[in-house]
């Protein structure tokens, strides 16, 4: 990633780290505390703003709480996705939490943001020299990467770039940037084809099977009914085959740029 397009280095900006505060507490703060815009994050195709969450200092650190705010009015119109991509960012967090996989940083819907309705996602510490391509080479993160792969199949992620997989503090992986997910038509484009044809781990299949019969009701307020039905359909299909899919169809299977 070019230096001028990288997120702020950790020495310039401290994101959330384990032990600073619980994720549930942080989710409440993201949903209710006033937001102050600090500046624009330069690597996003749509408007993404770094904001400070105006809340009491957390834990034993004096660093403020930061988040990424994506307002709807800063989105560029797309021919194949309706306006309101920020709702899909929130839906991704809802799906991740419903599965119990904890892949997506806490993300909430705010209608009272500085630029109106949008998503607000916790900004987490990450090593931006690392991304999917570097992480998969080590072999140490296969369990988490397989979970992200399965998540993307069910969410129908049309834009899983390598840089959308972050290595956070404590070795935890986070998946970000889910505005182009949940379309009812097949649109899977991802860099994670390394597991194609491999069996999906049993514990992931168990979680997906439970999801099929119990979609979180919050999704109905974020996505169209046909899109919600498609989530259950894709989850059921993955459970039935038990294997990660191979690239299919005429669409390019990889996003661009790759990172």
Image: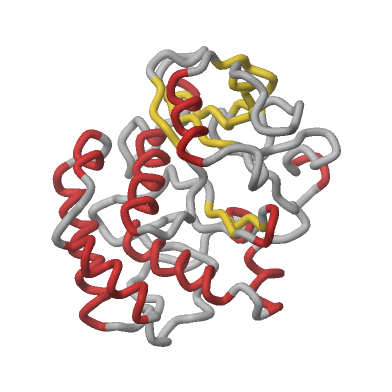
**Is 244 above or below relative to 175?**
below
Give the camera-side residue of 171 and 24: 24
Question: Which image quarter: residue 14?
Answer: top right
**Which residue is pictured at 58% across the width and 53% down the height?**
164
Q: Nearer the viewer, residue 77 or 192?
A: 192
Residue furthest to the bottom in view is: 198
Relative to 106, say whether 254 is above or below: below
Residue at the farthest right position: 11
Hey, which quadrant is residue 199 in on the image? bottom left
- Figure label count: 0
The residue under the point 63% across, 65% down is 132
Picture residue at 23% right of the left edge, 53% below the top: 184
Question: In this orientation, which residue lies closer to the viewer: 243 or 74?
Answer: 243
Position of 105 with respect to 39 (left or right) is: left
Q: Nearer the viewer, residue 132 or 83?
A: 132
Does residue 50 lie above or below 141 as drawn? above
Residue in the image at 29% along x and 50% along y: 183
Q: Position of residue 6 (x, y in %)?
A: 75, 43
Q: Is residue 81 left or right of residue 221?
A: right
Q: Give the quadrant of the C terminus.
A: bottom right
> How is this picture coloured?
secondary structure
- Residue 179 spot, x, y in % from top left: 43, 43
Q: Is residue 226 shown left or right of residue 76? A: left
Q: Residue 76 location, x and y as percent?
A: 46, 31
Q: Is residue 196 left or right of residue 153?
A: right
- The location of residue 111, given as percent across then percent down, is 38, 17
Q: Vertical placement of 187 versus 24: above or below?
A: below
């Amino acid at each position: 990633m070019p230096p001028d397009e990288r997120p702020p280095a950790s020495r310039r900006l401290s994101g959330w780290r384990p032990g600073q505060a619980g994720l549930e507490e942080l989710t409440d703060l993201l949903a209710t505390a006033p937001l102050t815009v600090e500046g624009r994050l330069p690597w996003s195709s749509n408007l993404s703003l770094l904001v400070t969450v105006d809340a009491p200092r957390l834990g034993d650190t004096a660093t403020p709480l930061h988040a990424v705010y994506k307002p709807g009015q800063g989105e560029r119109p797309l021919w194949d996705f309706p306006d309101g991509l920020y709702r899909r960012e929130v839906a991704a967090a809802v799906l991740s939490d419903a599965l119990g996989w904890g892949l997506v940083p806490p993300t909430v819907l705010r209608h009272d943001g500085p630029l109106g309705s949008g998503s607000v996602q916790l900004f987490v510490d990450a090593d931006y020299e690392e991304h999917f391509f570097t992480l998969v080479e080590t072999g140490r993160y296969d369990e988490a990467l397989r979970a992200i792969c399965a998540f993307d199949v069910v969410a129908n992620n049309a834009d899983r770039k390598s840089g959308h997989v972050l290595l956070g503090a404590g070795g935890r992986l986070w998946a970000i940037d889910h505005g182009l997910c949940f379309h009812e038509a097949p649109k899977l484009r991802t860099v994670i084809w390394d597991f194609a044809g491999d069996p999906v781990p049993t514990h992931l299949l168990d979680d997906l099977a439970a999801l099929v019969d119990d979609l979180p009701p919050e999704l109905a307020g974020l996505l169209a009914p046909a899109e919600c039905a498609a989530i259950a359909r894709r989850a059921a299909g993955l459970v039935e085959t038990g294997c990660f899919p191979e690239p299919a169809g005429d669409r390019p299977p990889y996003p661009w740029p790759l990172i």
